[in-house]
C-alpha cells in the first residue's frame, strides 16, 4: 500500500495535520492507539486572552481567526456542529481585579475581546460579590465529537489503524519510508507527550504539564457563559459541566491526584452556589514547552520525518495554523516561523 503520508496520533494536532494534507490531495494513513490524551479530556475553550495576567497569548487573535474558520469548514464537511460560541465571565475577587480588568479593556489589543463594563447582576447560582467582566468572541469546541466524527471519516476511507506505532518497525531512507507493508513519502508525529518515547525526537524539551479535572452534574448552575475564576467552569449541556484544570509540572502520570482533585473542589465551592454531583475525576498531561511555543519541523537528519507537538493548553487555537505551517514547509519548502521551529532546540535532536 502506498500513501503520501503516515500520521501518528489523532488528537487535535493529528486531525489538523490530516485535514491539511487531504485538502492538498494527499493520501494518508493514521495510526492511533485511542488512548485518551490531552485533546480528549480538554474543555475545548478557545480564547486568545490570558485572564490571569491580562496579556494576549502568542499570536492569539490571528490564530483564533484561522482556527474558527478551520472548524467551521469541518462543520460543513462533516454535517455536524462542533463550535459553540460562548462568552467567558471573568469573576473578580477584589476591587483591585476590577481595576486590572478596566485597565486591560482600554488597551487596543483587548478592545475586541474584553467588554469594559463591570457586571454586578450575578446569577443566583454563582458567587461573585465583586461582579464579573465578559470576554466576547470566544467559546468552546466539542473536541470529543469532532474527533469521533473525523475518525469515522478516516475509517470509511480505509485511512485508519487503531494501533500504536512501533518505532522499531520503521525502515527509512532518502527515497521513502516503509512501515508494516505501507510505503510513504512522509511520516508526521503528532503524539503529544507520547513523544517522550519517540527515538527520533526524545531529546527535545517536551516537559508536559499534569492537569486534574472533574466533570459535574449541577442542576440550576448558570450555563449561559463559561465561568472563570481560579478555574474554568465550562457548560457541556444537560446540566453537565467541565471543571478544571490544575497545573502540576512534576507529576508525569496520566492519573488524577488527591491534591489536584481537592484543589478543584475547593475552588469550585468558592464560585458556585448550588448542589452538584461529581460524575468523574480525570487527569491529562498537556504537551508543553518551556518557552510556551508549539514545536514543529523536520528531523535534522531524516528529511521525511516530521513533528507537530507542544500545543499545551491552547491546542484548539494553535493546531490548525501549526498544521498549515508544517504542510507548507514540507510541500512548498516555505520556512517555518522561528518561534515554533524545532531548530531552536536543534542541538537536542
Image (cartoon, rainbow, N blue to C red):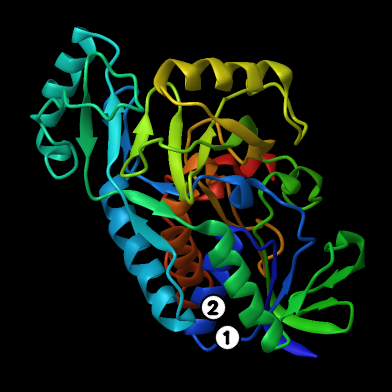
- What residue is shown at x 25% (from left), y 9% (from top)? 94
73 sits to left or right of 94? right
Asked whether residue 231 is in view, the answer is yes
Please name whichever residue, 82 or 193, is drawn nearer the observer in this view of the structure. 82
Q: Quadrant of residue 107?
A: top left
Compared to residue 116, the image places residue 150 above or below, namely: below
Dot 1 crowding, Cα within 10 Å, few <14, some 14–19, many 20+: few
Q: Quick one: SS at disc 2?
A: helix
Q: Quadrant of residue 56?
A: top left
Compared to residue 146, the image places residue 192 above or below, namely: above
Q: Quadrant of residue 153?
A: bottom right
62 sits to left or right of 181? left
- What residue is shown at x 19% (from left), y 42% (from top)? 113
Asked whether residue 205 is in view, the answer is no
Marks 2/1 in contact by CB < 8 Å: the verdict is: yes
Where residue 222 appears, as percent x and y from the top left, is: 35, 37
Q: Quick one: SS at disc 1?
A: loop
How far apart are the two marked residues, 2 and 1, measured between alpha carbons? 5 Å
Please name whichever residue, 34 or 218, is drawn nearer the observer in this view of the structure. 218
Whichever of labels 2 and 1 marks the residue nearer the N terminus, that label is 2
Per the image, the residue denoted by label 1 is: 26
Where residue 143 appears, as percent x and y from the top left, is: 53, 58
Say the numbered circle drawn on residue 54: none
- Residue reaching furthest to the top: 95
- What residue is shown at x 66% (from left), y 37% (from top)? 285
121 sits to left or right of 205? left
Per the image, the residue denoted by label 2 is: 21
Where residue 148 appears, as percent x and y from the top left, is: 62, 68
Amino acid at each position: 500500500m502506498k500513501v503520501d503520508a503516515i500520521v501518528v496520533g489523532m488528537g487535535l494536532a493529528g486531525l489538523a495535520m490530516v485535514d491539511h494534507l487531504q485538502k492538498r490531495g494527499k493520501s494518508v494513513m493514521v495510526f492511533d492507539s485511542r488512548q485518551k490524551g490531552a485533546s480528549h479530556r480538554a474543555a475545548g475553550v478557545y480564547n486568545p486572552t490570558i485572564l490571569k495576567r491580562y496579556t494576549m497569548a502568542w499570536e492569539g487573535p490571528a490564530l483564533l481567526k484561522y482556527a474558527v474558520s478551520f472548524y467551521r469548514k469541518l462543520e460543513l464537511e462533516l454535517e455536524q456542529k462542533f463550535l459553540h460560541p460562548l462568552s467567558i465571565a471573568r469573576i473578580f475577587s477584589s476591587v483591585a481585579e476590577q481595576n486590572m480588568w478596566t485597565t486591560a479593556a482600554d488597551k487596543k489589543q483587548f478592545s475586541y475581546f474584553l467588554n469594559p463594563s463591570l457586571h454586578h447582576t450575578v446569577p443566583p447560582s454563582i458567587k461573585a460579590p465583586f461582579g464579573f467582566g465578559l470576554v466576547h468572541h470566544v467559546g468552546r469546541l466539542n473536541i470529543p465529537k469532532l474527533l469521533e466524527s473525523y475518525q469515522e471519516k478516516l475509517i470509511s476511507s480505509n485511512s485508519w489503524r487503531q494501533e500504536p506505532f512501533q518505532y522499531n518497525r520503521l525502515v527509512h531512507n532518502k527515497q521513502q519510508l516503509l512501515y508494516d507493508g505501507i510505503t510513504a513519502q512522509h511520516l508526521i508525529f503528532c503524539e503529544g507527550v507520547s513523544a517522550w518515547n519517540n527515538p527520533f525526537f526524545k531529546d527535545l524539551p517536551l516537559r508536559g504539564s499534569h492537569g486534574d479535572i472533574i466533570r459535574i452534574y449541577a442542576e440550576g448552575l448558570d450555563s449561559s457563559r463559561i465561568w472563570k475564576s481560579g478555574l474554568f467552569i465550562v457548560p457541556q449541556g444537560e446540566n453537565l459541566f467541565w471543571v478544571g484544570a490544575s497545573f502540576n509540572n512534576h507529576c508525569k502520570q496520566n492519573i488524577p491526584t488527591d491534591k489536584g482533585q481537592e484543589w478543584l473542589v475547593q475552588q469550585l465551592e468558592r464560585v458556585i452556589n448550588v448542589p452538584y454531583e461529581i460524575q468523574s475525576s480525570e487527569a491529562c498531561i498537556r504537551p508543553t514547552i518551556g518557552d510556551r511555543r508549539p514545536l514543529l519541523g523536520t528531523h535534522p537528519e531524516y528529511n521525511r520525518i516530521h513533528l507537530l507537538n507542544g500545543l499545551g493548553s491552547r491546542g484548539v487555537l494553535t493546531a490548525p495554523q501549526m498544521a498549515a505551517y508544517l504542510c507548507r514547509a514540507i510541500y512548498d519548502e516555505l520556512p517555518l516561523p522561528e518561534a515554533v521551529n524545532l531548530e531552536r532546540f536543534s542541538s537536542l535532536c
